[in-house]
Image: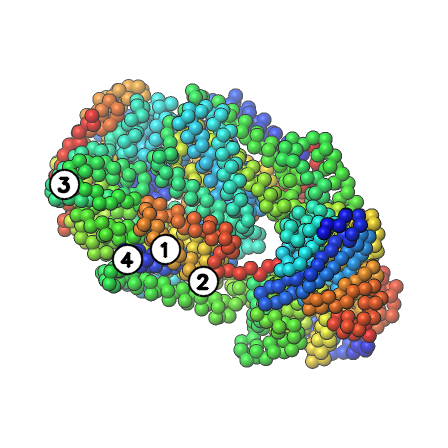
C-alpha cells in the first residue's frame, strides 16, 4: 500500500516535469489524452475492481459530464473552472439515480442494464435536439483563451492527482474494505454489518463523479461534444485499459491508460492493419497476462517470495 | 523538405468506412495525376491519410498528429460534419487551412472560421437547385420525407420540405431512422397509410438500398426521389430492379458527358475498376483544389495558401468550384438523375449558386 | 455393533498409489503418499485439517495432476488421466462440499450421475435404487438442488456418486452435515454396497464412524502417510489417535 | 411490547413460519436465547434449522411470526441492519472472502467498529487511525484464538475445508457479536479438533460474546457445550430442554439420533 | 385497425429475427456465461461467408447455408479451444476483454479482406409480396421465419432432450462435478461455443439474404442480442423467443405510433423496466440460498 502510494506519487511527479522537458504539442496532446483516460480508467476501476460488478455503462457518466460542461459553457458562458466541477456533480447525481436501479442487480444483468442506461442517454442526446443539438453536437465550447497545451496538461494533471487521492483514500479505508467484502462475498459482507447496496453505491457514485470530471474536461479540451461520447467504442477503450493494466489495483488502470493511448497512436503507422493488430494485441494480453500487467508483476513478486505487493485490497496501513 | 504534405482524415473503419474509402480513392487518384505532372512547387505531393473513424476525439487525435508530427501544409476532412466541427478549431488554432469535400451541415460555414472551406454542396443548395424541377416533373402534390437520423439526413429533409412546401407541395409525413437500420417495414407501413405521391429520402448507399428494396417488397407505388450516393453502380447493383425509376439529386454522377468528366471516369475506372461516385469525386476535387491553391500560393506558407484557396477557380469534372467569403463552394453543376435500365440518366443539371 | 473387519490383505490390490506428489500452483500439498486398496476392502484416510486427504482423492480421480509418483488401477497407470476416463474406468469420487448442480432438479442431478450409462432402463433402475436408499430425495425429486438443505444436498451428492455403479467408491466426508441418524444410515449404505463387492476409500472426520466401517486406516499428516493400521487397533488406542489427529 | 434490554431474553422469536411454494419448511417455532446462554438448535436434515437462522438474521422474511432482538422488533430488517445490532451469524455453506488472506478476512470482519462518515473516508483523522490500529490488533488476536496463526497471511482460497470453517467463526467474532449464531461450525473438523473447538466456544461466552446459538450435528460438541437444546423436526418444535433430558427423550432418539442413542 | 395489424405483423417478423440473431448468444452468454462481444461478428461472418460462397463459388442458398454452418462451427470450436479455454474459470472479465479483442480483430480483418461495402447474398426463393387481408409480408420473410422457428425448436430440443444438453447444463453449473460424472467438459465447452457460433452465423446468412451483409453490422446485432437474452432470462430458449418477439413488437408499435427515429431506445427501456420488476429476467429461476 505504501508502495502503491509512492508509485502513484512518483508518476504524478514525473508527469509534472513533462511540460518542462517537452514542447512538442503533439506529444503534449498525447500526454493530455493519456491522463484523461487515466482518470476514466481509474473511475471505472472503482466499480469493476471494488464493487466487483462489471459496468458497461460508464460512458453514461463521461457523457453527462461532457454535456453538462458543454451546455453550461455554450448556453450560460460558464468558465472551465466552474463547469468542470459542476460536470462532476451532475454525473454523480446520475450515478446516484442509475446506481439505485442497477446496483440491485448482479452479474450479467448488471452488465447489460448499465449498458442500457448509457444507450438510452446516447439516444436522448441524439434526439433531444432542442437541448443537445442532436447529432450535430455542441461545438464552440469556449476554451477561455487557453491556447497552450501546457495549460491543459496542468489542469488534467490536477484532476488526475485528485482522482488518485480520492480513490486511494477510498480504497484503503474501512469503506473500501467493505466494498471488497461485497465483491468477494455478499453474504459474508451482510453478516458483518455491511450494507451491500450502500457500499456499492459509494464506489459507484465516486466513480461517476470522477468520470464526470473527466467528461467536463474533455468537453473543454476537444471543444466539441456529440452523442458519441456515450458510445460503446469509448467504453471498450476504457475497459481495455482497466483490464490490461489490472483491475482492482490503483496503478493498473493508469498503466493501461498510458499504454493503450500510446499503442493506438503508434499503430497509426500501420494504416489499415492498425485495428486488426490492436485486436490481436488485446487478445494476446489476455492470454499471456490474464490478470493484467499489475497482476503479472504481483505474481512475479510472489514467486520470488515477497509478500504480494499490490494485493487485491488490503495491506499494512501507514496513514 | 522534399515533398508537400497534405493530411487527409477520413473514416476508414466503422460504419461509414464504406464512403470514407471512396473519398480516399478519389484523393489518391488526384495525387497520382498531379505527381505524374511533376507535383507542385517542384516537389512531389505526399498524401498522409489518417483514420478519424468519424468520431470527434479520434479525428482531433489524427489532426494533432498530422499537424505536429507530419507537419502537413493543408488538411482535408473529416467526412462526418460532427468530426469536421471538432477539428475546425484545431485547424484554426494551428492556422492550417482545412478543406472538406463532404461535410454538409450548414452550420459549419456559419462559424466564421477563416481557415475552413467546404468544397461540397449543402442540402439547402441542392434543394434550391432541384425543388422546382422535381415538383413539376413528378407532378407532386404531397410528399413524405424520410431521412437518416443524423445532421445530414435531418438537414436534407428540412431543406427539401421547406422548398417544396413553398411550391405548394403538402407534407404527408416526416420520419427519421437510425443509421444501420435493417428493417423498414414499420416506417413503410406508415408511409403507405399516409398515401403521398412522392417520397423524399435522404440516405446513404447501405440504408438507402435496403429501404428502397423493402419499399418494393411492400408493394408501394409512390415515386421515390432524394439525396445520397444513389447514382452509383454499387447502389444500383445492391438495390436491383427496385432502383428502377427513382430520382436522385447528386453533386456528381459519372454519366455526365463532358470531356473533362469522361477523362476522370476513365482514369478512375482504370485504377479502381469501378466508376466514381459522389464521394470518389469529392476526394478528387478536394485534393485538386488544395494542390492548385498551393501552386498559386507559391509556397507552403499557411496564410498564403489560405488566401489562394479563397480565390479558387477550379475546373472540376462537374463544373467550376469557387468559394464564397464564408468558404462555401458554388458554381459547380449538380445533377438530377433517374435510374433507367440500371443506369443513372441525367435529367437536369444546374449550377449550384452561391447562397445569399 | 460389529463392523465386518477383513484382514488387510484380502483380495488383490486394485488401487496402488506410490510416492504421489501433488501441488497447488507452486505450493506442494502432498509430499509422497503411498497407499494400497485391495479388492472389496473399505479403507479410511484420516488426519487433521489440511493434512491432504482430499487432495489425495482429487489426484486419484484426476481432478489434480500428479507432480510425480504413480497411481495404478488394476495395474494400469491412471495418473494424470482426465477425470472422465477415470470415472469410465470404474472409480467414482463424491467430493467434499457436495457440488450438486444447483440449477437442476434433484431428479436430474441423480440421473446425470449415470451419464456414462447409455441404457435408459438401466438408469431408471438405478434411480429407483437411489430413491429407495434416500426417501427424502424422492419427496424432493422436483426441487432445485440449490435450494435443498445442507444435509439433503449431501445425500444427493452421495446418491449421485453411486449412480455410476463404480468398482471403487471414494467418499470425501460423507457424513458432513448429516444428522447422527442419517449418518448412520449412510454408513449402512456404505456397508451394503461394500458387501456387494464395491471397494471403498473413505475420508471421514467422524473417526468413530470411519473406523467402524473401514477395515484399515491410513493416517495422513501434512501431506505424508505416517501410519497404516487395522481399524480395531486404532479404535482401541485413543491416545495414539489423538496424537495423529491433533495436527 | 418492548421489554427493557436488561431484563428480557436477548433473542425471542414467536410463531416463526416459513413456506416455500407448497413446502412449509418451518412452522410456528418459538425460540428464545437468554443472556449468557449457549443454546443448541438441532434436528434432522431438512428440519428447518438453517431456515430459522435465515429468518432470524433477515436473510429470509418469515411468512409469519416475529423476531425480537434486545427487545427490538427486527422481523423485516435487512441483514446488515440486524448485524449492526450485534446479532452475527455464520453460514452452513462455507462462505469466506476467498481472494483475501486469513488476516484480511478477519480485519474486514471489523467493519462495524470502523464505520465512518464519508468525510472521514477522504480526510481521515486521528479517530480513524486509532480505530484502524485497534482493528489490526484485534484481528491478530482473533486469528490466534481460532488457531489459525500459522495461516495468517495465506489466501483463504488455499485453506482446507476444516480451516475454512474456523476462519468463518473468526470473521464472525471480529464483528464483536452480542449473540453469535453458528450454523454447523464444526462440520469438517475431526473429533479431536471438534473437542478443542468446543472448549474455545465455552471460553468465548461471557468474554467475546454474550450468548451463543449453535446448529450442529456433532452430538459430543452439542452436549458438551450447550446449556439448553431446542429440537426441530419437520419444521416444528419437537422438544426443548437440558442436554441430558434431550438425550433421553425417545422422540428425539427416534427422529434424530438413531442408533447412536441406543 | 389495419394499420395496427400490419405493425403487429412487422413486429412479429422482426421479433423472430431478433430471437434468431440472439439464439447463439443464448447458448454462449445465457448458458456458458461468456459475455461474448464477438457475437455480432460471428453473425456478420455468417453473412460474409454466405455472400462469398454464393457469389464467388456459385453455390445455391441452401448449400451455402450448410457450408457456412461447417466453416463457422469449426472456427468457433477453434476459438474456444485456443482462446476461451485459456481463461476459463477466471471470472467474466478476461472473457470480456478477449471477446472485445476478437471482435475488433474480426471486423477489421474482414474489412481488409472484403472491404466495407454491403454485399448481396443470393436469395433462397424469388421474392414477392404476399397479401394476407390487410397485412403485407413477403415470401422470403415467411421462409426466414419458418427456418428461424425451426432452428429455435431444434436448439431447444438439443438443450432439453439430449445427453449433450444435460451435459452442457451440468458443465456450466459445476464443471468439477460434471467431470466427475464422466462428462468431457472440455468438449462440452467447445461444442457449445461452436454451436452458438453456428447458430449466429446461420441467422447472419439468412438475414443477410433479406437485408444485406456488411462487415460493420456486428455491433448493433450484439447489442440487440444481449437485450433479447436478458429480457428473456439467461439461458432460456422460450425466454429468447419471448424476448425477441417482445422487442420486435415493442419497436414496431413505438415506431408506428410514436416515431421511428428513436426505436432503439425502447429495447433498453424495456430491459431496465423488466429488471427493476423482475431481476432475473422473464423466464429464469433462481436456485440459490443463503
Ligand atoms: N484449491 C487449493 N488451492 C491451494 N491449496 C489448497 C487447495 N486446496 C487445499 N489446499 C492445500 O492443500 C493442503 C491439503 O488440503 P486438503 O484439502 O487435501 O486437506 P484435508 O486433509 O482434506 O483437510 P480437511 O479435513 O480440512 O478437509 C492444505 O494445506 C491446503 O491449504
Ligand atoms: N428456497 C427454498 N425453496 C424450496 N425449499 C426450500 C428452500 N429453502 C429451504 N427449503 C427446504 O426447506 C427445508 C428446510 O431446510 P433447512 O435448510 O432449513 O434445513 P436444515 O434443518 O438446516 O437441514 P440440514 O441439517 O440438512 O442443514 C428443506 O427441506 C429444504 O429443502
Ligand atoms: C454520410 C453522411 C452522413 C455525411 C454527411 N455528408 C455529413 O455531413 O455528415
Ligand atoms: Mg478435505
Ligand atoms: Mg442447515
Q: Is mark 4 within 8 Å of ligand 3?
A: no
Ligand 3, image quadrant it occupies:
top left
Looking at the rendered structure, whether the residues under marks 4 and 3 are on a common chain is answered as: no
Residue C71, placed above or below residue E89:
below
Question: Which chain does tag 3 point to?
Answer: B
Q: Is mark 2 within 8 Å of ligand 2?
A: no
Q: Which residue bears the numbered disc 4?
A: E1
Separation (CA) of disc 1 from disc 4: 19 Å
Q: Is residue C46 visible?
A: no
State the residue in front, B317 or E225: E225
Q: Give how far apart the Cα atoms at labels 1 and 3 are.
A: 37 Å
| Crowd around label 1: few <14 · some 14–19 · many ≥20 (10 Å) | many
**Label 4's element?**
loop
Element type at marker 3? helix
Label 1 marks a residue whose chain is E
State whether discs 1 and 3 lie on one chain.
Answer: no
Q: Which of the marked residues, 1 or 2, is nearer the chain's N terminus?
A: 2
Q: Locate residue E203, reporting x and y percent.
A: 36, 59
Q: Residues within 10 Å of mark 4 (few under 14, many from 20)?
A: few
Mark 2, residue position? E237
Which residue is under mark 1?
E248
The Cα atoms of the two marked residues, 2 and 4, are separated by 32 Å
Give the percent coordinates (x, y) of residue E102. 45, 49
Mark 2 / mark 4, whichever is N-terminal: 4
Q: Indicate the chain on which mark 2 is placed.
A: E
Q: Nearer the viewer, residue D252 or B86?
A: D252
Q: CA distance from mark 1 to mark 2?
A: 16 Å
Residue wearing tag 3: B135
Amino acid at each position: 500500500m505504501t508502495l502503491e502510494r509512492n508509485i502513484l506519487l512518483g508518476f504524478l511527479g514525473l508527469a509534472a516535469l513533462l511540460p518542462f522537458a517537452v514542447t512538442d504539442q503533439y506529444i503534449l496532446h498525447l500526454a493530455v489524452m493519456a491522463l484523461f483516460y487515466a482518470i476514466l480508467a481509474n473511475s471505472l476501476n472503482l466499480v469493476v475492481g471494488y464493487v466487483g460488478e462489471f459496468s458497461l455503462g460508464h460512458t453514461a457518466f463521461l457523457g453527462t459530464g461532457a454535456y453538462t460542461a458543454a451546455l453550461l459553457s455554450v448556453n450560460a458562458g460558464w468558465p472551465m473552472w466552474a463547469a468542470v466541477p459542476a460536470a462532476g456533480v451532475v454525473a454523480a447525481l446520475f450515478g446516484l439515480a442509475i446506481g439505485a436501479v442497477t446496483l440491485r442487480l448482479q452479474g450479467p444483468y448488471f452488465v447489460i442494464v448499465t449498458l442500457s442506461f448509457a444507450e438510452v442517454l446516447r439516444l436522448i442526446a441524439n434526439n433531444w435536439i432542442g437541448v443537445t443539438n442532436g447529432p450535430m453536437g455542441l461545438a464552440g465550447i469556449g476554451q477561455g483563451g487557453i491556447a497552450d497545451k501546457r495549460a491543459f496538461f496542468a489542469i488534467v494533471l490536477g484532476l488526475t492527482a485528485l482522482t488518485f487521492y480520492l480513490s486511494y483514500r477510498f480504497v484503503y479505508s474501512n469503506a473500501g474494505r467493505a466494498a471488497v467484502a461485497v465483491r468477494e462475498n455478499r453474504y459474508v459482507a451482510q453478516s458483518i454489518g455491511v450494507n451491500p447496496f450502500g457500499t456499492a453505491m459509494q464506489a459507484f457514485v465516486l466513480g461517476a463523479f470522477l468520470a464526470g470530471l473527466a467528461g467536463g474536461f474533455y468537453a473543454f479540451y476537444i471543444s466539441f461534444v456529440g452523442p458519441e461520447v456515450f458510445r460503446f467504442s469509448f467504453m471498450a477503450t476504457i475497459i481495455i485499459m482497466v483490464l490490461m493494466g489490472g483491475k482492482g489495483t490503483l496503478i493498473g488502470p493508469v498503466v493501461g491508460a498510458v499504454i493503450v493511448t500510446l499503442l493506438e497512436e503508434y499503430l497509426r503507422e500501420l494504416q489499415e492493419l492498425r485495428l486488426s493488430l490492436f485486436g490481436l494485441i488485446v487478445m494476446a494480453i489476455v492470454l499471456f497476462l490474464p490478470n493484467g500487467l499489475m497482476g503479472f508483476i504481483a505474481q512475479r513478486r510472489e514467486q520470488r517470495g515477497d509478500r504480494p505487493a499490490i494485493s487485491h485490497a488490503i495491506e499494512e496501513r501507514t496513514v | 523538405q522534399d515533398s508537400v504534405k497534405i493530411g487527409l482524415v477520413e473514416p476508414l473503419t466503422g460504419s461509414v468506412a464504406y464512403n470514407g474509402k471512396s473519398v480516399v480513392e478519389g484523393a489518391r487518384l488526384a495525387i497520382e495525376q498531379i505527381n505524374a505532372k511533376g507535383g507542385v512547387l517542384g516537389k512531389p505531393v505526399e498524401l498522409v491519410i489518417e483514420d478519424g473513424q468519424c468520431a470527434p476525439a479520434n479525428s482531433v487525435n489524427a489532426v494533432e498528429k498530422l499537424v505536429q508530427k507530419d507537419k502537413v501544409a493543408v488538411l482535408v476532412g473529416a467526412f462526418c460534419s460532427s468530426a469536421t466541427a471538432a477539428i475546425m478549431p484545431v485547424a484554426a488554432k494551428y492556422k492550417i487551412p482545412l478543406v472538406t469535400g463532404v461535410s454538409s451541415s450548414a452550420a459549419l460555414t456559419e462559424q466564421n472560421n477563416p481557415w475552413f472551406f467546404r468544397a461540397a454542396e449543402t442540402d439547402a443548395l441542392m434543394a434550391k437547385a432541384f425543388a422546382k424541377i422535381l415538383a413539376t416533373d413528378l407532378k407532386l402534390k404531397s410528399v413524405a420525407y424520410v431521412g437518416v437520423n443524423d445532421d445530414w439526413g435531418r438537414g436534407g429533409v428540412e431543406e427539401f420540405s421547406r422548398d417544396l412546401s413553398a411550391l405548394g407541395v403538402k407534407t404527408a409525413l416526416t420520419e427519421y431512422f437510425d443509421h444501420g437500420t435493417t428493417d423498414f417495414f414499420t416506417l413503410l407501413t406508415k408511409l403507405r397509410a399516409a398515401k403521398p405521391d412522392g417520397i423524399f429520402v435522404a440516405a446513404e448507399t447501405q440504408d438507402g438500398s435496403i429501404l428502397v428494396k423493402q419499399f418494393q417488397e411492400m408493394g408501394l407505388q409512390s415515386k421515390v426521389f432524394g439525396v445520397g450516393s444513389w447514382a452509383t453502380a454499387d447502389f444500383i447493383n445492391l438495390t436491383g430492379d427496385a432502383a428502377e425509376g427513382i430520382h436522385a439529386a447528386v453533386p456528381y454522377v459519372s454519366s455526365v458527358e463532358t470531356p473533362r468528366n469522361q477523362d476522370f471516369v476513365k482514369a478512375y475506372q482504370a485504377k479502381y475498376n469501378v466508376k466514381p461516385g459522389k464521394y470518389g469525386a469529392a476526394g478528387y476535387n478536394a485534393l485538386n483544389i488544395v494542390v492548385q491553391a498551393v501552386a498559386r500560393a507559391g509556397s507552403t506558407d499557411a496564410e498564403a495558401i489560405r488566401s489562394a484557396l479563397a480565390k479558387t477557380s477550379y475546373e472540376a469534372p462537374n463544373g467550376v468550384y469557387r468559394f464564397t467569403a464564408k468558404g462555401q463552394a458554388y458554381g459547380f453543376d449538380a445533377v438530377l438523375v433517374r435510374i433507367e435500365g440500371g443506369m443513372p440518366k441525367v435529367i437536369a443539371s444546374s449550377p449550384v449558386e452561391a447562397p445569399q | 455393533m460389529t463392523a465386518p473387519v477383513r484382514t488387510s490383505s484380502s483380495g488383490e490390490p486394485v488401487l496402488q498409489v506410490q510416492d504421489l506428489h501433488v501441488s497447488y500452483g507452486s505450493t506442494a500439498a502432498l509430499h509422497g503418499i503411498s497407499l494400497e486398496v485391495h479388492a472389496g476392502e473399505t479403507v479410511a484416510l484420516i488426519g487433521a485439517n489440511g493434512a491432504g486427504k482430499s487432495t489425495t482423492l482429487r489426484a486419484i480421480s484426476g481432478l489434480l495432476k500428479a507432480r510425480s509418483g504413480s497411481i495404478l488401477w488394476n495395474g494400469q497407470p491412471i495418473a494424470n488421466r482426465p477425470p472422465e476416463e477415470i470415472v469410465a474406468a470404474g472409480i467414482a469420487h463424491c467430493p467434499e462440499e457436495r457440488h450438486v448442480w444447483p440449477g437442476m432438479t434433484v431428479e436430474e442431478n441423480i440421473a446425470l450421475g449415470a451419464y456414462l450409462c447409455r441404457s435408459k432402463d438401466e438408469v431408471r433402475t438405478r434411480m429407483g435404487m437411489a430413491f429407495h436408499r434416500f426417501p427424502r430425495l424422492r419427496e424432493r425429486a422436483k426441487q432445485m438442488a440449490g435450494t435443498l438443505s445442507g444435509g439433503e444436498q449431501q445425500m444427493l451428492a452421495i446418491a449421485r456418486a453411486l449412480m455410476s455403479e463404480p468398482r471403487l467408491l471414494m467418499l470425501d466426508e460423507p457424513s458432513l452435515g448429516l444428522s447422527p441418524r442419517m449418518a448412520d444410515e449412510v454408513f449402512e449404505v456404505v456397508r451394503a454396497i461394500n458387501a456387494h463387492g464395491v471397494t471403498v476409500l473413505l475420508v471421514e472426520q467422524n473417526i468413530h464412524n470411519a473406523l467402524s466401517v473401514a477395515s484399515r486406516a491410513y493416517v495422513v499428516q501434512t501431506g505424508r502417510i505416517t501410519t497404516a493400521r487395522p481399524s480395531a487397533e486404532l479404535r482401541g488406542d485413543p491416545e495414539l489417535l489423538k496424537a495423529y489427529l491433533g495436527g | 411490547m418492548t421489554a427493557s434490554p436488561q431484563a428480557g431474553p436477548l433473542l425471542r422469536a414467536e410463531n416463526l413460519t416459513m413456506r416455500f411454494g407448497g413446502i412449509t419448511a418451518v412452522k410456528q417455532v418459538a425460540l428464545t436465547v437468554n443472556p449468557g446462554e449457549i443454546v443448541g438448535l438441532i434436528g434432522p436434515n431438512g428440519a428447518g434449522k438453517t431456515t430459522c437462522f435465515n429468518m432470524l438474521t433477515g436473510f429470509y422474511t418469515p411468512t409469519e411470526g416475529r423476531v425480537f432482538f434486545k427487545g427490538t422488533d427486527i422481523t423485516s430488517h435487512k441483514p446488515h441492519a440486524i448485524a449492526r445490532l450485534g446479532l452475527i451469524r455464520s453460514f452452513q455453506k462455507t462462505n469466506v472472502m476467498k481472494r483475501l488472506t486469513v488476516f484480511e478476512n478477519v480485519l474486514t470482519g471489523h467493519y462495524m467498529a470502523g464505520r465512518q462518515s464519508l468525510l472521514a473516508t477522504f480526510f481521515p483523522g486521528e479517530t480513524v487511525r486509532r480505530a484502524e490500529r485497534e482493528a489490526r490488533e484485534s484481528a491478530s488476536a482473533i486469528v490466534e484464538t481460532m488457531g489459525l496463526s500459522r495461516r495468517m497471511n495465506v489466501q483463504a482460497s488455499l485453506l482446507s475445508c476444516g480451516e475454512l470453517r474456523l476462519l468463518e467463526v473468526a470473521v464472525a467474532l471480529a464483528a464483536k457479536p452480542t449473540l453469535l449464531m453458528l450454523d454447523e461450525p464444526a462440520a469438517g473438523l475431526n473429533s479431536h479438533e471438534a473437542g478443542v473447538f468446543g472448549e474455545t466456544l465455552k471460553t468465548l461466552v461471557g468474554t467475546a460474546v454474550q450468548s451463543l446459538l449453535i446448529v450442529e450435528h456433532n452430538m459430543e460438541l452439542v452436549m458438551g457445550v450447550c446449556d439448553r437444546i431446542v429440537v426441530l423436526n419437520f419444521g416444528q418444535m419437537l422438544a426443548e430442554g437440558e442436554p441430558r433430558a434431550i438425550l433421553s427423550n425417545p422422540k428425539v432418539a427416534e427422529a434424530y439420533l438413531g442408533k447412536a442413542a441406543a | 385497425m389495419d394499420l395496427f395489424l400490419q405493425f403487429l405483423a412487422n413486429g412479429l417478423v422482426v421479433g423472430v429475427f431478433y430471437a434468431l440473431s440472439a439464439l447463439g448468444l443464448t447458448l454462449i452468454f445465457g448458458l456458458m456465461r461468456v459475455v461474448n462481444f464477438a457475437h455480432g461478428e460471428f453473425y456478420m461472418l455468417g453473412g460474409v461467408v454466405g455472400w462469398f460462397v454464393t457469389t464467388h463459388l456459385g453455390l445455391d442458398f441452401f448449400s451455402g447455408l450448410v457450408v457456412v454452418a461447417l466453416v463457422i462451427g469449426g472456427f468457433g470450436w477453434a476459438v474456444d479451444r485456443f482462446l476461451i479455454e485459456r481463461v476459463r474459470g477466471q471470472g467474466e472479465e478476461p472473457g470480456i476483454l478477449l471477446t472485445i479483442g476478437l471482435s475488433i480483430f474480426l471486423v477489421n480483418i474482414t474489412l481488409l479482406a472484403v472491404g466495407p461495402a454491403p454485399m448481396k447474398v443470393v436469395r433462397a426463393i424469388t421474392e414477392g409480396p404476399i397479401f394476407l387481408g390487410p397485412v403485407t409480408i413477403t415470401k422470403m420473410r415467411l421462409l426466414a421465419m419458418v427456418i428461424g422457428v425451426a432452428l429455435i425448436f431444434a436448439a431447444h430440443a438439443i438443450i432439453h432432450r439430449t445427453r449433450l444438453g444435460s451435459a452442457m447444463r451440468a458443465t456450466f453449473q459445476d464443471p468439477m462435478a460434471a467431470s466427475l460424472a464422466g462428462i468431457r467438459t472440455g468438449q462440452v465447452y467447445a461444442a457449445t461455443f461452436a454451436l452458438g457460433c453456428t447458430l449466429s452465423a446461420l441467422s447472419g446468412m439468412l438475414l443477410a439474404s433479406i437485408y444485406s451483409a456488411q462487415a460493420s453490422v456486428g455491433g448493433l446485432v450484439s447489442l440487440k442480442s444481449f437485450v433479447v437474452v436478458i429480457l428473456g432470462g439467461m439461458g432460456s430458449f422460450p425466454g429468447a423467443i419471448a424476448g425477441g418477439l417482445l422487442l420486435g413488437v415493442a419497436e414496431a408499435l413505438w415506431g408506428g405510433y410514436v416515431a421511428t427515429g428513436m426505436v432503439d431506445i425502447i429495447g433498453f427501456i424495456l430491459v431496465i423496466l423488466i429488471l427493476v420488476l423482475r431481476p432475473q429476467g422473464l423466464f429464469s429461476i433462481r436456485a440459490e440460498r443463503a
